[in-house]
Each structure stands twice: as C-alpha cells, then as structure tokens.
Amino acid sequence: MLKRVHFPSSPLPYLLVAPQIIITIIFFIWPASQAMYQSLLIEDAFGLSQEFVWFENFEYLVQDEQYLSAFWRTIFFSICVASLSMGFALLLAGFADRVVRGALAYRTMLIWPYAVAPVLAGALWMFMFNPTLGIFPYILEVIGYDWNHYLNGYQAMFLVILAAAWKQVAYNFLFYLAAMQSIPRSIVEAAAIDGAGPMRRFWTIIFPLLSPTTFFLLVVNAVYAFFDTFGIIHAVTQGGPANATTILVYKVYNDGFVGLDLGGSAAQSVILMVLVISMTVVQFRFIEKRVQY
C-alpha cells in the first residue's frame, strides 16, 4: 500500500523567499510595468501633460534610421565584447590552470579588474588612449598611426569594445578556471599517455567539457554587453563621435534624460527588454541543445 508523507505547513519558506520577491517587484516588475505604460504616451518635457497614443512611439522607432543604426551597432558591439572577453578569459584560465608556483597571487591579480567600477574602467582606458596625454597614442604615433577617438568613430568603437571586454575578462576567468579545475585529471593524463599533445587535449577533451560553462557565460556576457556597458561608454565617448558608439542602452538615456523624450525613451527600453529576453530564450532553446552536461 502506498503511503503518503505529509509535512506540516510552515510560514518559514514564505518568509525566506519574501525578501527576494519584494526586491524583484520593487526593482524590476514595477519599473518594467511603468515603462510599458509610459511607452504608450507622449509627454511634454516637463511632465505637465500627456496623451495616450497607443503604439505610435514604436512605429516612429521602426522608421527612425538613427535607432535602426543603433540597433545593429549594439548587435555588433555585443558580439565583439562577448567573443573577446570570453576568448581571452579562456586563454588566461588555461595558463593559470597550469601554474604551480605562485598560483594564488597570479589568479588574484587576474581577478582584480572585476572589482573596478564600469565608469572607472572607462576612465582608465580614456586616459591611456587620450590623444594628447595617453601613452598608447604616443606609441602609435611613433609607428606612424594617427590615433584620435574623439574624431574617428571606428577608433572610438574599438576603444569601448576593448574597455568593456577588459572589464568582463576577470568574471569569465573565474568561471573558466573553476570549470577546468573540476575536470578529472585522470582523463587528461590518459590522453597524454595515448600521445595527445597539449592543443589536442584541450580541443578534444577540455573544451567540450567546458560547454556548460561556455553557454552560461555566453548568456551573461550578452546581457552585460546590452546593459552594463553604459558606464563605460558614458565615461569614454558619451556616445560619440557622431553617435558612432551610441548603443541601445545609451540611446535610451540620451533620448530620455537629455532629449526629454520620455515616451520614446520608454518605448526604447521596452524594445530593449524584449530583445534581451528573446535572445536569452533563443539561446536556451537552440544553443543549449549542443551543450553536454
């Protein structure tokens, strides 16, 4: 006879979950609902009058060439940042995993950049590449290359990609290193006994076993590139020159807080939120099928 186990009801689980639910409602659900409602309005710059226009703000964005340019620029920016930061972090993790002496100090120094605030990280790269005072423009001038990211949009985009990727390398490094150290050494040693070289062992054994970590970091880095790079862009280029580094999250700020187009800015934030959610769903729906846990 099947016996059913009954546990006495207790308010403790609800009390433990309540703080996280409250934080989610206050800082995500409520602002998101307000943005969705405000995206259907047209307001004056002082917020004294408003008009309900349904989806007129969204229709305007679809027809706006500057917004479409910012959209594709954001896609390019996120792909470059994710690829560069994850690739370099994987390389560093591979080297750190082989270090025997001074491993703790070496890994600690590699983790430090993650503690730097995005605005400060942007300021550091801005000073290093300053056309007048920076060390890198001086070196580039010696070899015959003229650097001025205040006037050259391609150089400005390269600089913000470099700064954003550098900021995220330490985060990716932590996960890759932990994943590598969790791989049984017996598997790698058996491949080495069979005659597989270091590169072959990495691509045929280590890298496939890192697929769950790589998938997780792909999602995290995509979200990071879309949202958390605002401080870096604001500190380095402020979206310039000529909107060459204006990505979607910065355009939301620029149109809403500078241009005071509150309805249009809210519509942009809704589109950005839907875009990131859709991208994450697609990643879990299709890319995760190639992940072997």
Image (cartoon, rainbow, N blue to C red):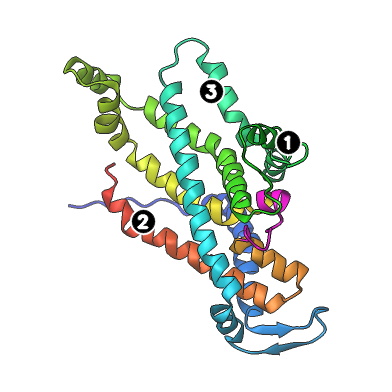
Q: Does the rendering let one see residue 206?
A: yes
Q: Which residue is mark 2?
A: 284
Q: Residue at x 45, y 45 (%)?
A: 83
Horizontal and vertical percent for residue 208? 28, 37
CA–CA distance between discs 1 and 2?
A: 43 Å
N-terminal of the pair, mark 3 or mark 1, is: 3
Quarter residue 191 falls in: top left
* Rendered position, 206 above or below 163: above
Q: Where does the magenta region start and end?
A: 232-246
Residue 181 falls within the magenta-colored stretch: no
Mark 3, secondary structure of its residue: helix
Mark 1 or mark 2, which is nearer to you? 1
Question: Which residue matches tag 3?
Answer: 107
The picture quadrant where one finds residue 249 is: bottom right
Tell me which numbered mark, 1 or 2, is placed earlier along the sequence: 1
| Residue 10 seen in this snapshot | no
Viewer-side residue, 257 vs 15: 257
For the residue pair 81 and 18, the one nearer the viewer reads as: 81
Image point (49%, 10%), residue name: 101
| Crowding near the residue tagged with mark 2, few <14, some 14–19, many ≥20 C-alpha atoms within 10 Å | some
Callout 3: few (<14), some (14-19), or many (20+) C-alpha neighbours within 10 Å?
A: some
Residue ID for mark 1: 134
Furthest residue in direction top, as rendered? 101
Q: Nearer the viewer, mark 3 or mark 2?
A: 3
Q: Which numbered disc flags the more N-terminal residue, 3 or 2?
A: 3
Dot 1 alpha-carbon crowd within 10 angstroms: few under 14, some 14 to 19, many 20 or more:
some
Name the one closer to the observer, 176 or 204.
204
Q: Is residue 237 above or below residue 175?
A: below
Whether residues under marks 3 and 2 lie with C-beta atoms below 8 angstroms apart, the answer is no
- Residue 157: % across, % down: 59, 52
